[in-house]
Image (tube, rainbow, N blue to C red):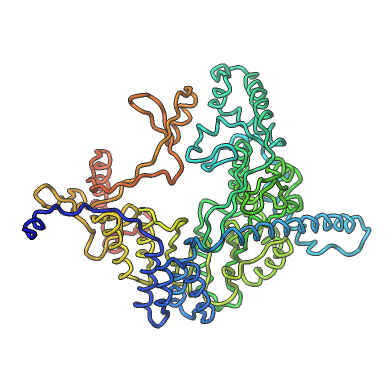
Amino acid sequence: MAKAMHKNAKPKAFQVKPVKAALLAAIVLEELSRDYPEQCNYLADIPLLKQGDVWLAYTGILERHRASPPDSAVQHWVYAQAEGVLKKLVDPAFDRWTPTGEKWWKNERRCARQNNKFMAWLRAATAFRSGEVETPPPFYAEVVRLAEALEYAVGTEPPISEILEAAHYGPGSSTDVRGEVVHYARKIESSECTPRAVELAARSLALDKAIWEHHGLRPEYAVGNPDAYSGAVRVIREALLGSVNDRDRLLFIHKGIESLRSIGAQPTCSGHLQLGVHSVLTRMLLDVGIDLADQGKNQAWARKGSLDWHADDPLCTLDKSDASNLIARMIVQLGFPAAWSRLLDQIRTPNYEAPPEIGGGTHAYSMYAGMGNGTTFTVETLLFWAASYATQDLPVTEFVKRGEYAIYGDDVILRREHALRYMRFAKFLGFRFNAKKTFLDGPFRESCGCDYYAGIDVRPAILDCETDVLAMADIVAFHNTLADQPNFALPGALRRIRQVWATHVNPVLPTDPQGTLGFRPGANGGYNVVRDAEGNPLLSAWWQRPRYFTLKYKQKFGTLGDIGPYTQLAVSAMRARQSGETGYWALPLRDRAVNYQLVPERDMERKPLVQMVANTLAHLAQRKSEPWWEISRGSKTDGS
């Protein structure tokens, strides 16, 4: 009877269970120990991970690595991969606020000392130039050349009209717009602005007709009416003056197991202006050979430096600690042209409200701004480029023409002889170099997310989790980064991560050969095949292979309610959508507001895409019939 009841019992429903980040970290450490026994043995650290002592496991591994530095590409990767699965996790037993607060106040005190030093330096420089004293202040020639380079890059006068037109809202929170709903339609409702930026903000905001609507103005009356814009500026100015705020909201977000990362949420309309300056400076940086939309030069030069490390004057990768938080306020006055210095000071937020975890209270910034200010990244890139010019002897035009530098934020690559001069000057300016990420000697180089050892890619997969539980997308992304490592494999770890998915998330495994909507397929193809009601595999007519399952993500949207036509026009140019039932528009919520669903892979159904592929294949077939095809294997070499 018991057997019969057991036989007829319904199968147990699948139960979703949380995937702990420490579980995946333990898997990787165990597989590293199994597959690379000559380089490591982390088996003693795994019990610490399983009982939740992430910090103890991490520090123990670090100590052993420091005691025996890597001497090969494989050992470097093994060490980096072991640290990479731990350094971005959290351990609730380890207090990150204490070291975070100590670092913050230390940086602010350092910037305050630098500000005093630079004011004394300016007085000494004035005395030297007037002939009162014969000896110039320290690094006088370098500071003069720093200012020369910045004037060359940005000009003597900021293009105010261009900045006002380029101003825009960023995707993050501000002092009064926070939470999930931080999109454009919420931000145009805000009038918060720093007092000194009110006039510029009013002129910039008046260029957006949706903001006219918000203030009860009629944008259509602006056509052919030159006074309408001035009237809108007056109305918006009054609103801004009623909402002035001279402090930003200092936040600390997840960075790693040891500390948190600072960010200053700006008053909304000040941040709008700052991003206008960012856009203009980004364009100006192109003229000196720096493209902030492309990290490729830094990455390629890091590899080149690791290949040629034994040369007399190799390329060296230089990285600073807390670079953004060590831009002292006076550096901007010291280096930038006077009009630019006044503008940057005018639109920065002078004070901040500290969180209670580091002591609370309102404080005046000693640093220029820190991260969160929309100008910080471009300002620091310009400063480090100008400092690299100041520490060599070519004229600025020739320096730019030769382009013997790669700079992206505080990631700087220079020849070693030049790098040593640059480092001395950067330290005078108050910056500290990160010894763990600055490489003047040896075969290792690192820049902009690429790590090379003697030209070999040794970049690890980083397991980043700000709680102890991984999201679906994080599991897939980590698996794929590990699978995509071109030189070092951990097949056992990949297999076990997929097993964790099957037992904890869903027994069906999604497949994605390129992106992050499924696991990288193995040598035998994808994982679970889509089947019809009879169990037969469904084939893709276009791709001539079985169809698999994939993840579909669905962004959460926030309804905007009743908005005017100009606001509708503005949001329709973004990622907005309109409800067919209510007619209301909606915009996506913040990036993490996403639902993931496992769905069967769809075959190509859109007729324009089908036709496009057919045309491409027909064009390729025609080219293959050309006489040059077989000789050049598809690459035309005759210039025709």
Screen quadrant of the N terminus: bottom left
**Left or right: where does residue 148 sit relative to residue 298?**
right
Q: Where in the figure is residue 412, as x and y percent of width and height? A: 60, 62
Screen quadrant of the C terminus: bottom left
Q: Residue at x 50, y 54 (%)?
A: 294
Question: In the orientation shown, which residue stands out farthest toward the front?
Answer: 1
Q: Where in the figure is residue 362, as x and y percent of width and height? A: 70, 45
Q: Please tell me in which quadrant of the rendered image residue 52 appears.
A: bottom left
Q: Where in the figure is residue 62, as x and y percent of width and height? A: 51, 74
**Left or right: where does residue 421 sit relative to residue 85?**
right
**Image: 306 above or below 154:** below
Q: Residue at x 67, y 70 (%)?
A: 420
Q: Where in the figure is residue 229, as x and y percent of width and height? A: 63, 22
User: Relative to the observer, which residue lies in front, 255 or 55?
Assistant: 55
Q: Please tell me in which quadrant of the rendered image residue 269 appears.
A: top right
User: Relative to the observer, which residue lies in front, 147 or 58?
Assistant: 58
User: Relative to the observer, which residue lies in front, 495 or 219?
Assistant: 495
**Left or right: where does residue 319 sit relative to residue 555?**
right
User: Relative to the observer, which residue lies in front, 146 or 319?
Assistant: 319
User: Total label count?
Assistant: 0
Q: Residue at x 65, y 35 (%)?
A: 193
